[in-house]
Amino acid sequence: MSALGRGILEVVDLSKRFGAFQALDRVSLQVAAGSVHALLGENGAGKSTLVKCVMGYHRHDGGRILLEGRPIRPGNPRQAQALGIGMVYQHFTLIPNMTVAENLVLSRARLPLVIDWRQEGKNLAAFMAKMPFQVPLAAPVRSLSAGEKQKLEILKQLYLDSRVIILDEPTSVLTPAEADEVLGLLRRRTRESDVSILMISHKFREVMKFADEVTVLRRGRLAGRGRVEALTPAAMAEMMVGGTPPADNQNPSTAEPGPPVLRLDGLCADDDLGAPALFQVGLDVRAGEIVGIAAVAGNGQEELVEVLGGQRPKTAGTIYIHGREYQGSRMEIERHKVRCLPEDPLRNACVPNMSVAENMALHDFDRPPARFWRWFVSKKTLLSRAAGWIEAFKVKTRSPETLIGELSGGNVQRAVLARELSGPVEVLVVANPCMGLDFAAVVEIHERLRQARDTGAAVLLVSADLDELLALSDRLLVMSDGRLVHETTPATADLARVGQFMAGHDHHKERAA
């Protein structure tokens, strides 16, 4: 039994197999009542499988799940919720065109045939008055910031009287200040009520500051556990990787950047609903330079990457590469050697039902040596080249002919990087390249980005991870509400000020050069 008190949620010798793959092998975990329990592990360690078994997405093959000492076996998330177990997912599950109040009420499992919205409003106002943080009940969800949406997802679980709340990477869309606020208030909530938290995270700073206990998984097995106060980040990292984790070289470039390669002048673009998403964006990225853009989700950075990658039209402004106007056509992308790794590459940079080899050939399948005799494509050439790239970029796949949609997220990243970086690169646009990836993948991708810079590419790196930006960038910009509002360098950055600009709290907008 935990030193913090009785166990409210326990998994005992839990096992789960998918075909020949053993995803969980006799894993045990205990969440003490009134605690914050962190679940750590590299990509593919079994964290998601474990919580999906608890939530009823998967049926476990062996072992037991106990809630307050009683065995449970939920068949789906609704049954888990009825038992008092809720989950806040990495991606929002809110209805954008409904209000905060409507999202809360409609999250209930049972509703009357006719909803008395006046009474519901009174009940929600009373509920909100007792909550650790506030979100305006009448506001449409689409008008909320990413931080407010994440708070609403947590409030929804408190509204549903969840006694155990599972958080899956809860701060991935929050600024550092917002992350500290949300986790601090949740930790206080566990002390003041009967709520307990199981938090999947990869951020050691947050684990050390807010978690009481930690369980570490490695390759589907229990690798270690203990009280956070008795552990160090280094010790937890060693549990995760089974040894000393690879070091991420954070030495800045010593070479002087060259002339501007990529230039944006007054760039504007709309989002998918036709609302303005980018406002008069202007910046330069020079040869041999990494320019980082810090932004939390929903502030125009996704539209910016899509415009540069030729996936979204601009509505105003001009893009120049080497002083020549650039429209993002396929011909221009190849002429200027523009390469792009967007966020969620399986959706935005791949065809899931095509093979790894075919996806690696999307740039040049219709040109020699891949093409011969007009429109005939040499499968042998594609497979041979893909095999070399798979080895060079350490892509874990059964063969080059495996569907890319069957690969893990980290291996999709590697496969797309292999395609984008295997050849001359003049402009490289990258968005959140390491979200949710393990130590080895993060270190390797960071090194690939540095190599591209050191060979003369102009690199634009968009990320919500300030630590990543500080480790890689030569210059750092902040984007908020579709505008560039602040510029600094990693060496001189005031992190509190950067966080305020990311959150849009500073209404005095600076003009970024």
Image (cartoon, helix red, strand yellow):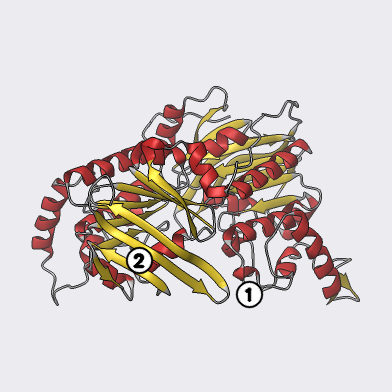
Q: Is residue 174 above or below residue 390?
A: above
- Say the numbered circle drawn on residue 281: none
Q: Residue at label 1? A: 353
Percent from the top left, x then y, of residue 139?
26, 53
The residue that label 2 is drawn on is 54
How far across and down, in percent of the image, does residue 408 sit?
Answer: 59, 63
Which is closer to the viewer, label 2 or label 1? 2
Q: Answer whether residue 273 is visible to the viewer in this image.
A: no
Q: Residue at x 43, y 37 (%)?
A: 231
Give the image quarter of residue 334. bottom right
Report whether 364 appears left or right of 472. right
Q: Amino acid at mark 1?
A: Asn
**Residue lying at 65% horizontally and 42% vertically, measured from the top left:** 446
Whole-percent x and y of residue 225? 41, 48
Image quadrant where one finds the C terminus: top right
Q: Quadrant of residue 178?
A: top left
Give the secondary structure at mark 1.
loop
Check contact, mark 2 vs mark 1: CB within 8 A: no
Asked whether residue 497 is in view, the answer is yes
Q: Nearer the viewer, residue 403 or 398?
A: 398
